[in-house]
Image (tube, helix red, strand yellow):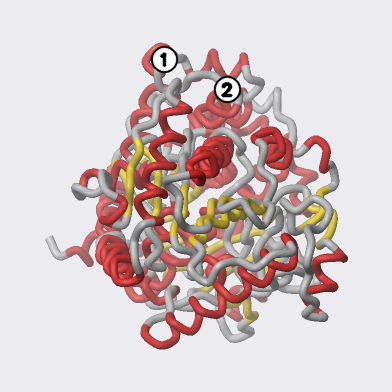
Amino acid sequence: MDPLEKMPDYLFESSWEVCNKVGGIYTVLSTKAHTLQQLFQDKIIFIGPDLWDNQSPIDFTIDNQLFHDWKTYAESTDSLKIKVGRWNVPGTPPVILVDFKPFFNERDRLFYQMWQDFGVDSMHAYGDYDESCIFAYATGKVIESFYRYYHLEEKKVAALFNEWMLGMGALYIKKQLPDIATLFTTHATSIGRSIAGNNKALYAYMDGYNGDQMAKELNMEAKHSLEKQAAHHVDCFTTVSDITAHECRQLLNKTPDIVTPNGFERNFVPEGKQYTAKRKEARKTLTNVAEKLLGCTISSDALFVATSGRYEYRNKGIDVFIEAMNYLRASACGMLQREVVAFIMVPAWVKEARADLKAVIEKNIQTTCQMQMPFATHWLNQMAEDKVINYIQHAGFSNSANEKMKIIFVPCYLDGQDGIFNKTYYDLLIGMDATVFPSYYEPWGYTPLESIAFGIPTITTDLAGFGLWAKKNRIGDRIEDGVAVVTRTDFNYFEVANAICNHMLTLSRKDEEEMEEIRHNCFDLANKAEWDKFIAFYLDAFEIALRNAEKRKC
């Protein structure tokens, strides 16, 4: 069959992170957008939350001509408050941002209907549950209005909903517009993440866990119920990796219809002279901040290493990263011959950019002694309770000039306006020599994929979907290949830290020519994970969904 025959005529894709950069799903969607737009030519329509009142997000441009007639109808007849425009990412696909707040007065009726129709139990909901579900409901209303206005009954239409937050949108469409093929993707099960986050052994006892029972124990009943029912009722249920597929089978009692791994887009990465210039600028910025904070000169050949992601101290392996850097510090007396500066780029509860550090950077003052708290670039609201700061100090780091191993916590969101670096994450990532993501719970693992896409060798684990994918490509034993995959279990914390330390020692002995060869190996592997290869899995998912939706017409 021609792959294009698997495609719907129209595709709606919705997520809390459309034009709302709060996590890894934003990167999944914003990089996938280019390939989807090439395939659908403005008939891929992303739907996200309008959280900006009378303003617009910086990555969104209003287009008053796009779907103009429908927008007028939707606002006047269907009482929808929407913005229509384009996402400012490669491909610039159409986007509809919906203000969901007016639908809060329908919450009780919605929750009752979801219980009656699909068995979704919202009785024990708390936190972000209500807001997410009302947005999902508003998303369903947007799709319904668009579908009916443009008379798409004779078209092949599919709607893809991401994460439990959009579950009610999928179920609403399933009931109200049964001709639309529904897809639901879980990027991580809510109960699996909760088990791991509560310091329980997820993998050793996986086959013994009951999802419903654990949801009650961990007070996750509402989210788990919604996610489970969405998985069971849509036309195609997908997840992002084999390891999460096993998790879904056990905890949601539903085997995904297909695994749709996350790709990346080459056009996010500079090339040639621009790559060289950006890397040089990044290293200059990183060096300058480190020197001002620490009051000493950083070697021109210092090895810059980073970890990043959400502040999930155990799940993301932030604790293991610090431990591994401490092992590396202990090796400095003999095996470590090169200076290493480690950056923990993990957003925390930031109070403000440090005024003292900001001032010396802006005035370009050369500091000759350490600043107070030489481990952080920004002040936190609860500095004394912060796990990262406490463990760095507990481990015995000093960041003194005579220490080869230095560690710096960058607890802000790197959007180019943090007050210290004033560069985006990608504009700093390109200056690194290595990254480390020793995740305990990582359904896919976008950060290591981003790293190799920028030519930066990375260390990850076999509990990350990306790590397993790398091993399938016979990569992972040697950091020289671009990716080193460390075996991680529920109980081998210190062995993981030691393995990371050894890989870092290996890298520290490489000269520039050898590092250049490693960068090329990174690019080669990243090419295998570009969206133009991985989009085939989505085409198969669309076919499954359309086929199952068609059965309802018979």
Give the amino acid type for the residue marked by disc 2 in the picture: Asn
Q: Is residue 413 above or below residue 91?
A: above
Q: Is residue 214 above or below residue 350?
A: above
Q: Is residue 441 above or below residue 163?
A: above
Camera-near label (2 vs 1) is: 2
Residue 92 visible in this rendered orientation of the protein: yes
Around disc 1, counting alpha carbons within 10 Å, would you say few (fewer than 14), some (14 to 19), or many (20 or more)? few
Task: Looking at this view, name the residue that lies furthest to the left.
Answer: 1
Q: Nearer the viewer, residue 510 or 547?
A: 510
- Residue 95: percent from the left, percent from the top? 56, 70
- Residue 30: percent from the left, percent from the top? 49, 66
Tell me the quarter of the picture where residue 203 sits.
Answer: top left
User: Mark 1 = which residue?
Assistant: 205
Tell me the quarter of the picture where residue 423 sits.
Answer: bottom right
User: Mark 2 = which residue?
Assistant: 199
Give the amino acid type for the residue marked by disc 1 in the picture: Tyr
| Element marked by disc 2 | loop
